[in-house]
Amino acid sequence: MHDADVNVYPFQDWGSPQGKEYRSTLFLLPAVAGLSGGTLRIPNSFLTQVGGGHNVVFSTSILLCIPMIMAGIALQDPNCPFNLLIAAALLSGVGGGAFASSMSNSSFFYPKSLQGMALGYNGGIGNLGISISQLLAPILMSVGTTPISSEGDSPVNGWPANAGWLWFPLCAASAILAFFFMSNQPNHGEKNILVSLVNFYWMEAFGFLASFIGVITLIQTRNAAMLQTPAGQVIHKFLLVLLACVCEYVFMMLSPKKARDRVKKQVVIFKRKHTYIMTWLYIMCFGSFIGYSGSFPKLIVDLFGYLTADGCLQKSGGFVPAGNGMTSDTCQGEWKLNYDYPNPNAPNGSAVAWIGAFVGSVIRPVGGIMADKYGGAKMTNIAIIWCTIAAFGQGALVQTISKMDDPTSNSAYYGLFVFLFINLFGSCGFMNGTTFGTIGVLFPAEEAGPVLGWSSAIASYGSFVIPTMFGIALQAGNPQITFYGLGAYYVTCFVLNFWYYLCPGCKKPGV
């Protein structure tokens, strides 16, 4: 919409960025939501036993309604401040926390032989929300009465505020249903519901504070000297994750005594070597899945949706490339060099953007069931081979596409791009199920829940790191580097998983 009319969401509070800078700025929104979501998963990993599943679920459902209301109202204004959207993205991180506590809570209801299946269905249905959002949000944004921009000769038909309300009815209904029909496990939470709620909101508030520290540091250091190089930018993002994690750990130790005692009983997982091994593996699975979910629709636009040329940026906001009588002398506006403008032949990314997350979500229970039947570690390594081939293949394809003047000149490139991404989603979704099946077997019940929550917390930072890495690589003109780097990481996961759980003489065979 900003491409069609520069007066729509110019983000003046961020200096009115244009071109690649504008698109790179937009990557901050999923990155902030990912940073916040990962941080809030840390306390929620332990909150099921601290506050009780009933109290945690209805409370997180209520909290999720807040950023939806903010986005629904803010996006009605074409001059919406970017900082307000960042605030909504930060608050939306409670959804990540809700996922961690849900997985932890579910693990207590099933025996080890069914952990893969149960967690696969719970996580797969939850992950479907990404696909549904990518499918329905563009549809909702295309219907309404008064469009976001109705001025000028070419009004921009769109109602982006509708997307902010997409999940509000379901979250509100979930809060009501959870309050009246869910129960706590007998040994979870306190007998007094008010005490349990105080413990929950205390730890959740400090989770938001840790997220806020991470996000503010991200914004305030976005022009730091270390960011002048791609390597410095990547290191910067990992330092932000480390900062948020350390802050959250310190804040958890400031919880009320009863809550703190329950947390301390669970943090024994950090003395287990396999906690860190499974976290490393789950970053590969869910970290990649959630990172690709935030990057796939954006990469379609960035790689296929723009052409670069010299031309005239007209006062009305439209761009006319040089040629056919358009010169710097005839330009009635500002003459631009190497300007990125919308490709008239760009594919409709919203038509396929939802497919990847959908495939990754529906295949997750399959991975869990296969893990229960054949062993999680064995199924994981098979899927790692699948994922690694797709990652390196996508890197080679993107490297070719980025050198083309118009990648839409050959439709086969776009079809192969989508195909390889679907394979990445499918393999990562399958491994989401297999690795959680392994965790359910590898740890005792009282530790499996926290390990599930903790590993998903760290892995979910992929939704912050991966879109940011793509943004950095795009600015540097080498988007393929991100795929190559991820492919190399998948190779380390294959070796680690084989060494500890599959090779002859390993200490934990058959998990």
Image (spheres, rainbow, N blue to C red):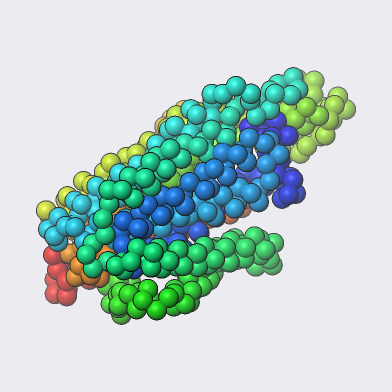
**196 to 155, vertically: above or below:** below
Total labels: the figure holds: 0
Q: Viewer-proximal residue, 340 or 88?
A: 88
Rendering coords of residue 293 (x, y %)? 43, 45
Q: Identify the residue shown where x is 13% and y is 65%.
A: 510
202 sits to left or right of 323: left
Rendering coords of residue 373 (x, y %)? 11, 53
Rendering coords of residue 457 (x, y %)? 39, 62
Residue 418 visible (yes or no): no
**471 to 19, vertically: above or below:** below
Residue 256 visible (yes or no): yes
Q: Identify the residue shown where x is 67% and y is 63%.
A: 220
Q: Identify the residue shown where x is 48% and y is 74%.
A: 251
- Among the 4 quarters of the image, the one containing residue 106: bottom left
259 sits to left or right of 216: left
**62 to 164, vertically: above or below:** below
Q: Quadrant of the C terminus?
A: bottom left
- Among the 4 quarters of the image, the one containing residue 446: bottom left
**188 to 103, vertically: above or below:** below
87 sits to left or right of 380: right
Rendering coords of residue 431 (x, y %)? 28, 53
Q: Identify the residue shown where x is 31% and y is 56%.
A: 54
